[in-house]
Amino acid sequence: MAKPSRFDELVRTVTKDVAEHPRDLTRHYVDRLGISRVAANRYVQRLERDGWIARSGPSTHPVFSPGHKRRLSRLYLLSGLEEHVAWERDFRPYFNLAPNIQSIAGHGFTEMVNNAIDHSGGESVFIWVSQDESALRIIVSDDGVGIFARITDALGLPDMRQALFELAKGKLTTDPAKHTGERVFFTSRMFDFFAINANGLQFDHAARSPRDWLQEVPGIFPNGTAVFMRISLTSLRTAGEVYAEYTNAPEDYDFSKTVVPMKLARFGDEQLVSRSQAKRLIARFDRFRSVILDFSDMQEIGQAFADELFRVYANSHREVELLPKNMTEQVERMWLRAVAPRHTG
């Protein structure tokens, strides 16, 4: 791997440098790099051209400030780390964000860092935050066992891919005394794009896409967990709106609704045909009042699968509303066949 250039090294720290040295940035680089003032001034001019810093005041005594491009990164030891302190002290002051974006960014940052603190089993976490003309991006990467391996082990699941499917439903936690299991679900819905890479698997959720994605990526993040978040700087989304969408607000603030991407219920090329697959699917449905079953990209399901889900489970859990959507004609026939006895009996 090529060694980063001196300019690339400056880009890594320029956001903090310019905030701490608004009136003596050139002198700061002279002292720090051991270079001439002429050379340091060339770096400052390039940083300005590229949008990393902005200049104001007289030409002889300019005042510099962060530009429209901003970037900070930091490696922390997990032991003793407080996620809200890291956000409020080391990151938030250096970014120029609308109130709703700042609220979402703070939520995503602190929730994912706290996940690393409480659940990763690792020693350190690397955090990278970047802002450009259009978007804010956050990466939180720890060196632990990997979120999917940890869930699989804690819940005794037969396949690591099922851990990701359970995570997508929401209300999943390996430590119920400390957490409700809602943080990954809600965070993924707040950002325009949200992804988790761990244990050779990748989960993606995009606000503009009707479906979530699961793919195997062997060799990518075999150890630890990396979370990627992105949101447009012009987004009008608010954290409150996301919470309200999955609760019965304003009547209550319980996490009462989830959307289950049925595509993620399949492992590999298998089809959803058996009762055992349906039983795997319905785990923890009883924690919700409404479960929206999104059949996007599902061409067909089996009669036994449909019967177990829509008749057997529905009859024994009448407090849980099952709401299928995006069904093909075949899936709809299986659904109608399963629910018909309930309406005629």
Image: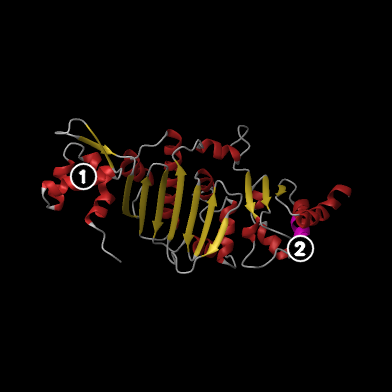
Q: Nearer the viewer, residue 257 or 211?
A: 211
Bounds of the magenta span?
302-309
Disc 1 residue crowd, few under 14, some 14–19, many 20+, Cα 10 Å? many
Residue 266 sits in quarter: bottom right
Q: Residues within 10 Å of mark 2 (few under 14, many from 20)?
A: some
- Which three-letter amino acid code belongs to the residue tagged 1? Val
* Depth check, front residue: 95 or 224: 95
Q: At 12% across and 47% down in the image, what residue appears?
A: 38
Colour setting: secondary structure
Q: Horizontally, is 62 left or right of 169 in the view? A: left
Distance (Cα) linking label 1 and label 2: 65 Å
Amino acid, disc 2:
Gly
Q: Position of residue 285 (x, y in %)?
A: 66, 52
**For the residue labelled by badge 2, is the local secondary structure a helix, a strand or a loop?**
loop
In the image, farthest residue toward the right: 344
Judge left or right: residue 117 versus residue 335. Answer: left
Say which element carries label 1.
helix
* Residue 296 at x, y percent in the picture: 66, 54
Which residue is located at x 25 percent, y 39 percent? Answer: 19
* Quadrant of the snapshot with the N terminus: bottom left
Q: Which mark is residue 313?
A: none
Q: Which mark is residue 302?
A: 2
Q: Position of residue 44 (x, y in %)?
A: 21, 44
**Quarter-wise, where is residue 48 in the image?**
top left
Q: Quadrant of residue 86?
A: top left
Side of 19 where 37 appears, left or right:
left
The stretch drawn in magenta includes residue 306: yes
For marks 1 and 2 on the same chain, the one whose residue lies earlier in the sequence: 1
Pair 1/2: label in front:
1
Q: Which residue is found at the position 56% from the left and 60% from the top?
A: 214
Label disc, if present, on residue 44 of the rendered structure: 1
Q: Can I make out residue 181 in this image?
A: no
